[in-house]
Image (cartoon, rainbow, N blue to C red):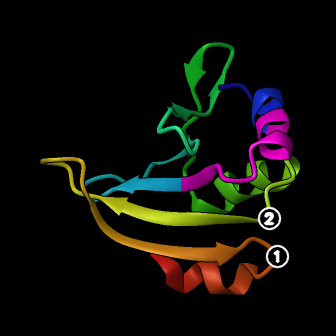
Amino acid sequence: MELQQLKHAASYHHEMEVRVVRNTLSHIYQIECETGSGNRQKLSRRGKPCLFRSIDEAIDQLLVAGISHAWIVRQNEEDGSDSSRRLVQLGNLPELAIAI
């Protein structure tokens, strides 16, 4: 899903869950979206996955897309399950420092 597609989806799919995902063994973040029907897509740029070095970089992209809140998720490397999840309002950037 490209950034323009994310903007469009966010305006029409209010039940869409947006996540900033970090693997437990990595310091790289990805943005993942899941619609109410269970369809999952990761944010990409020119067909390649968008990877972010910091949570702030990922949040900046979400703000550009008009996303007002997102789940901050840490996933286990072994099975891909969520080891922690926290919903944040993206306007409250000071909270993100303690989210992960």
Position of residue 49 in the picture relative to residue 57 (left or right): left
Number of numbered markers: 2
Position of residue 8 in the picture relative to residue 98 (left or right): right
Position of residue 65 in the picture relative to residue 49 (left or right): right
**Quadrant where the image shows the C terminus:** bottom left
Quick one: label 2, few (<14), some, or many (20+) residues within 10 Å?
some
Distance between the Cα atoms at labels 1 and 2?
A: 7 Å
Q: Is residue 7 above or below residue 19?
A: above
**Quadrant where the image shows the N terminus:** top right
Amino acid identity at mark 1: Gly
Q: Which one is closest to the eye, mark 1 or mark 2? A: 2
Q: Residue 86, percent across and down?
A: 49, 76
- Residue under numbered circle 1: 91
- Tag 1, which secondary structure? loop
The picture quadrant where one finds residue 82 is bottom left
The first of marks 1 and 2 along the sequence is 2
Q: Residue 38, percent across and down?
A: 47, 39
Q: From which residue to which does the magenta span run? A: 7-19
- Residue under numbered circle 2: 68
Residue depicted at 61% across the width and 78% down the height: 96
- Tag 2, which secondary structure? loop
Q: Which residue lies furthest to the top in this view?
A: 47
